[in-house]
Image (cartoon, coloured by chain):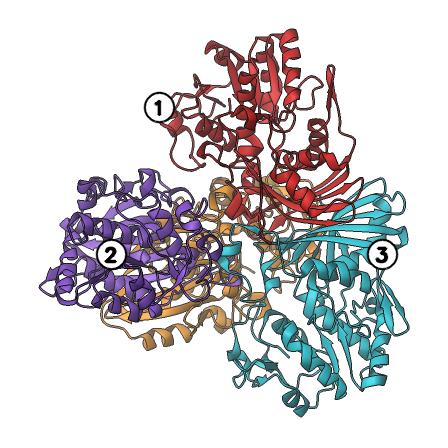
Chain colours: A orange, B purple, C red, D cyan
Amino acid sequence: MGCTGLVGQQFVRLLEDHPYFEVVALTSSSRSAGTAYGEAMAWAVGGDVPGFARELEVIETSPETVLGRSPEIVFSALPAAAAEGIERVLRERGVRVFSNASARRLDADVPILIPEVNPGHLEAARRQAASYGGFIVTNSNCSTSGLVMVLKPLERFGIRDVEVATYQSISGAGRRGLAAMDITGNVIPFIRNEEEKMETESRKILGEAAGASFIPAPFSVGATCCRVGVREGHLMSVSVRFAGPVSVEAVREALASFRGVPQELGLPTAPERPLIVRQEEDRPQPALDAFAGRPERARGMAVSVGRIRARGETVRLVLLVHNTIRGAAGTCLLGAELAVAKNLVN
Amino acid sequence: MGCTGLVGQQFVRLLEDHPYFEVVALTSSSRSAGTAYGEAMAWAVGGDVPGFARELEVIETSPETVLGRSPEIVFSALPAAAAEGIERVLRERGVRVFSNASARRLDADVPILIPEVNPGHLEAARRQAASYGGFIVTNSNCSTSGLVMVLKPLERFGIRDVEVATYQSISGAGRRGLAAMDITGNVIPFIRNEEEKMETESRKILGEAAGASFIPAPFSVGATCCRVGVREGHLMSVSVRFAGPVSVEAVREALASFRGVPQELGLPTAPERPLIVRQEEDRPQPALDAFAGRPERARGMAVSVGRIRARGETVRLVLLVHNTIRGAAGTCLLGAELAVAKNLVN
Amino acid sequence: MGCTGLVGQQFVRLLEDHPYFEVVALTSSSRSAGTAYGEAMAWAVGGDVPGFARELEVIETSPETVLGRSPEIVFSALPAAAAEGIERVLRERGVRVFSNASARRLDADVPILIPEVNPGHLEAARRQAASYGGFIVTNSNCSTSGLVMVLKPLERFGIRDVEVATYQSISGAGRRGLAAMDITGNVIPFIRNEEEKMETESRKILGEAAGASFIPAPFSVGATCCRVGVREGHLMSVSVRFAGPVSVEAVREALASFRGVPQELGLPTAPERPLIVRQEEDRPQPALDAFAGRPERARGMAVSVGRIRARGETVRLVLLVHNTIRGAAGTCLLGAELAVAKNLVN
Amino acid sequence: MGCTGLVGQQFVRLLEDHPYFEVVALTSSSRSAGTAYGEAMAWAVGGDVPGFARELEVIETSPETVLGRSPEIVFSALPAAAAEGIERVLRERGVRVFSNASARRLDADVPILIPEVNPGHLEAARRQAASYGGFIVTNSNCSTSGLVMVLKPLERFGIRDVEVATYQSISGAGRRGLAAMDITGNVIPFIRNEEEKMETESRKILGEAAGASFIPAPFSVGATCCRVGVREGHLMSVSVRFAGPVSVEAVREALASFRGVPQELGLPTAPERPLIVRQEEDRPQPALDAFAGRPERARGMAVSVGRIRARGETVRLVLLVHNTIRGAAGTCLLGAELAVAKNLVN
């Protein structure tokens, strides 16, 4: 659902020749519905429109049209307002929804799943299924996904608070979300709702699943989110205060050796190494590192980390995440792959 | 000295029709020496080369050539390595040097003067004059100048620590200091020595003059410095932890009402209001606010502040400083104007 | 009319302290109407909103609201569709309309006036006034204005055909007209209707006023219009084939010595020299030359020309025009100043 | 030779797992010699340094070091001045040199080979081999390669003259060749020697091999070369005057059906379709089309063409070529593949 935007395009690209999933329908708003997918938009995520999708007629997003195709799962790249209603309707009709939309992320029974970070939260989907038939699993806001991937292996040192300043790319605003005059040769120090999302979602993701809901992680997150004139990749400057002194070596080792359940299970879209620790003094950089991740199917799924510095209890570092892959479609797809592996999707 | 670089050009521009100073010579490296200033470089700071400078023959930078012109004061826009030796030689020959170079900033007897922030530090120049005949007064690193302007009026709330992430423009690297392939469509999360400068200089500036030296201010500063593809203006995300809770209103009022000695004295290059507090949710921005400051002569001398947020003891804000004006030539010139007002230059 | 867009803002900026004109009303679409001008939009043309306009309440654009203010003249920065109807209605009600809109440019009785190039075409306004009471005078498309300024002094060599390729800035698309994802790090080789406008308008402007209409100039113009990621200033590569061989020196001399009626009359917004011939091998450049023109009031009104090369009958050159000043508001205002001088406005 | 620059890196990338060639040595200037290739530079052409090259020690470029490795062929990505001497020395020692350097392109006995365009010119290499033992084959300047690919299938209509304006990317200036302050938010309407190269090389390539030398094609080419702030891909606006009227359909058909010898022979780096004709009104664009070409090994080897317009005898179009692949390393490699197929390399 929502297949013509940048995140929707990434979904389509990642689903080409996917070993688990077969696309039965692509939906969009009424503007593009009725045309072949290959004609429905300007393809903007590299290469060409995948062959399977080129001639597929786009259908209008609605509960009826979607249910008419009897999907086992639905990937949602809808805007929040459009997702608001339809995702819950589909859940009640038994559909498993994997959603990049922010609409339901903070629902008490809906997990924000970053498979390497909180795979156990997927159990909340099982509880939803018991209530509704279907379920909704969300992935986080694009910036948050990079942040929690790096914080997870650092939890062992006792995180007390986190200060983050972002350098976010223009693709994060969607294809038409930002006017050229506003960002060309400029920095915009404001992205609506982004700081609140980072501060809330990261603590939910790193929090504990407790019965029917989630207890936020016991540290504070403060964010300042800025837009820069880069096409792809969100860079972040992160400062973490720990319970006690931590060394650069300990941090580097914790990050470099990090592996998650997706790596153990060998899920198709899982990068071999979820975190790439750069030793150069001036990396990561969006132009060089946005597409980190191997094998080919996992390009853009690894988060790059560099410039690790420690002073007393404080560690500073810089990280980079591909915002529409690891920060959106890729993580959402990886979540669905994990659900298959955990028999939540048959 | 060093009149062909971007900072040198700003000096020349600002010295046109200056009420206190008259230019008797312009110096540069041997590459440009011997040519008319108007032909010596590509003028890159707006408008045209000032009439007074156009036909002036550039002389090579050396103690002899400079002393040969018997200047009462010298403005130095030399690179650090070139400044290293010559500035001290000139001081010993009785010259008053106002320098943008970093070479002598951390000398125990040399002040880093931001006239609105630490005018009292100028007394250290008087002590130098007693020892050497002349003196050296420096201004700070470009990013630091914006930071301390904003921290000064917040000292009353009890600063405990400061976390800053910068979005620095390419002009900060000088005219040829950065390759286009490195920064176009990119962010570079490293600027050599910049973080150390911010962390050290800001504490010296906000510290106390104690006899022959300076006691650093008693708070810590942690910085992450990044380059973005903007031509002019350094933006910063700043997070300050205070001794106790502080309100947004109190911070805003402290910033908006801030005036310094240059404003009281009506110095020519002093902006009417040194800090411009923006109320819009998405300001300041380099493309819109880099040249803040009135009157005309003080364009680029005001620091813009916005996005003030408070949570408990922590206040977050975004500031913007024009790096080659307030962050370099303009503050250096303002320091010399203050020295005239204080009878350190006759 | 249409005071909140980029061209509208330039009109407001240029009308501050204007010796001929006083602003009695500012209009915009219903979205901004009813608010103070200073709050009605993000000011994006440098400096601050002029004092006279800051508190002025913006009124909605309609014949009634405009006529209610009894203006002697109206400047129109409306989009073409909005201008379509209202400009003619105002003309019939006796108003003199100076319009940047394209709607009426090709009307047989409406001149496209570039005061340095075809001042005689203003007589068509007198004929309109005889028929309607009021009149409409347009200025050309932004790119065309630069082209015809350079072609005019070259007519003496016998122009046979003109080939032009443009490098147009994003401000030409208006404040919201272009998405950041479309142009960042990119070139878009298409601007809707732009090539047709250049090909048609330039021949009308350089053509002859013949009784009630205009005979297009007897040469062909071929244009390819591209958008590049520059904020302000349209650059063009122009190749002109003449009736016979022409030397670089002859072309340079013709361009450098060019003066028009506005210069003779000393109109307020006329640049001392309408064409600035650059001798450097790599000029003009948007970042350095977009605001060419003296005195201060005429910043952006001069067209810069460089890289003049001749080979047989063909001359190649590069020119640069500030698209929202010389290419829009500035030329429109200069046209009104000429009309005052010619007693068409009293 | 010259393996650390952008073109050198493209050679290394393209030679990974190449079916014909095995790399026996990588050379560079003394600055990088002696270090492992993976450490010798910042990799800037996507992905990671190929495994085969990572640990390979870079040797200094000199006739002795090169001959010491007994290569059958040598690829040269040297700067012109460095190539000047060594390429001829190597030829005399029996080496077959495929060079991207401009040094020898205009030698009477050296072909500028674009395999799809003038495969017959390779015979000149056979003649050189008879004289010297080895030979030098060059590829053209980066812009020229795109131009001649498009002109070749249009020759049938009788080309009379060609006018071209370029929008060239910053990678064309090499990794350090252009300062960020010069191009950010700017267009530079000058690239040293580029126009002369386009005008001369294109006529040699499209000319006739006549005994020991080449007769330039009998039409004129006029070029204006400009740099824009794009990372990869040179776009060009081209206007061609033919002997008689030509239709858009005829041009489109000629371009779309064009195939060359590399396609017939199925050479490894040959794109299936050398020219991609875009039907959209606003393509090709660097950000979307720079890497045109299939299969994977031929990414960036196809030239994209669009905006075909005809008026009388004149046809206008826009083309895009990847400057360091089709415009440099890729075409040079394709030339070597053709030489293998033609038994010039055994």
* Position of residue B285 in the picture relative to residue C151 (left or right): left
Which disc is residue B72 wearing? 2
Which disc is residue C310 wearing? none
Q: CA distance from mark 2 to mark 1?
A: 48 Å
Image quadrant occupied by the C terminus of chain D: bottom right
- For residue B75, which quarter of the picture? bottom left
Tag 1: amino acid: Glu
Tell which of C298 and B93 is nearer to you.
B93
Name the residue beneath numbered marker 1: C55
Tally the numbered discs: 3
Q: Secondary structure at mark 1?
A: loop
Q: Are marks 3 and 1 on the same chain?
A: no
Instruction: Say if B252 sits above or below A8 in the image.
Output: above
- For residue D272, which quarter of the picture? bottom right
* Position of residue C275 in the picture relative to residue A160 (left or right): right
Q: Is residue C289 visible?
A: yes
For mark 2, does the 10 Å Cα neighbourhood hold few (<14), some (14 to 19), or many (20 or more) residues? Answer: some
Instruction: Say if B295 sits above or below B211 in the image.
Output: above
Residue C325: image location, x then y, percent: 53, 33
Residue D214: image location, x then y, percent: 85, 68
Q: Secondary structure at mark 2?
A: loop
Image quadrant occupied by the N terminus of chain D: bottom right
Tell which of C259 and C271 is nearer to you.
C259
Tell which of B303 and A296 is nearer to you.
B303
Which disc is residue D153 wearing? 3
Residue placed at 53% from the left, 83% from the top? Answer: D36
Residue B276: image location, x then y, percent: 29, 41
Residue placed at 56% from the left, 86% from the top? Answer: D57
* Position of residue D93 in the picture relative to residue A168 (left or right): right
Q: Chain of mark 3?
A: D
